[in-house]
Amino acid sequence: DTAVSQTPKYLVTQMGNDKSIKCEQNLGHDTMYWYKQDSKKFLKIMFSYNNKELIINETVPNRFSPKSPDKAHLNLHINSLELGDSAVYFCASSQVLTGLENEQFFGPGTRLTVL
Amino acid sequence: RKEVEQDPGPFNVPEGATVAFNCTYSNSASQSFFWYRQDCRKEPKLLMSVYSSGNEDGRFTAQLNRASQYISLLIRDSKLSDSATYLCVGLDTGRRALTFGSGTRLQVQP
């Protein structure tokens, strides 16, 4: 019973391509997130959605576009991939946005390699 | 300056040792703090929330000093299975976003 799942787990693609990563959570949470973990292992938030509404949109190139068709899904589409986009992308979800109850559950990650 | 800074590590300790990790934060808007654990090539998982009065969960003790903007994690009687990267995390209530430190790697040796 995977709580937060992501597909694909690995993604190898050429520069300039467009790709999507899918995320689904079966925890009944209202909030979902996308994080990027770079080669130095630094984990940084990209987007968050609460009840399908965009809450956080950090300084991310507009080549990155999240889409939330419903509360249980938050997909990430990336246009015109660049070498610097190579990283591990984690999806996460939480029941609440703030407070010590904001435990975030992470998916297994998608390792994106741009050649 | 990063919002959350941690000891870079790695910490190499023998089994049974007590080890402490420190973390400082610069954003006074951060209201809640957590320690997450990340195993190699795995996703982060919540280890414990950090309460203002300090809290303990088995062998793990977390402390928060708001005046000094300092958070700590103490692990007693280290086990081999404690080997991982420990991430200090602040929650900015205004932005409703978690800010992660870069992590401290712990290697417990037999």
Image (tube, helix red, strand yellow):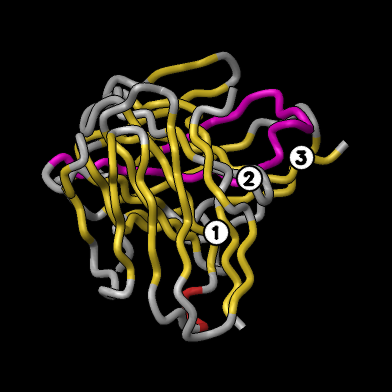
Label 3 vs label 2: CA separation? 18 Å
Q: Where residue B66 appears, x then y in whole percent?
A: 22, 37
Q: Secondary structure at mark 2?
A: loop
At label 3, the amino acid type is Val
Residue type (three-letter) at the residue carrying disc 2: Lys
Q: Nearer the viewer, residue B8 or A7?
A: A7
Q: Is residue B80 magenta?
A: yes
Residue B82 appears left or right of B90: right
| Amino acid type at mark 1 | Pro
Residue position marked by numbered label 3 in the rendering: B108
Residue B67 vs B17, above or below: the answer is: below
Q: Which residues are magenta?
A: B72-93
Q: Which residue is mark 2?
A: B42
Image coords of residue B109 (percent x, y) = 83, 41
Question: Does B61 appear above or below A79?
Answer: above
Q: Residue at x 38, y 75 (%)?
A: A79
Q: Are marks 3 and 2 in contact (CB under 8 Å)?
A: no
How far apart, in angstroms, are the residues tagged by discs 2 and 1?
19 Å
Mark 3 lies on a secondary structure that is strand
Which of marks 2 and 3 precedes in the sequence?
A: 2
Q: Nearer the viewer, residue B45 or B108?
A: B45
Q: Residues within 10 Å of mark 3 (few under 14, many from 20)?
A: many
Q: Residue furthest front?
A: A69
Characterize the local packing of mark 2: few (<14), some (14-19) or many (20 or more) Cα atoms within 10 angstroms. few
The disc placed on residue B8 is 1
Please provide percent x and percent y for residue A91: 44, 46
Can residue A85 be found in the magenta stretch? no
Q: Which of label 2 and label 1 is nearer to you?
A: 2
Tell me the quarter of the picture where residue B71 sits. Answer: top left
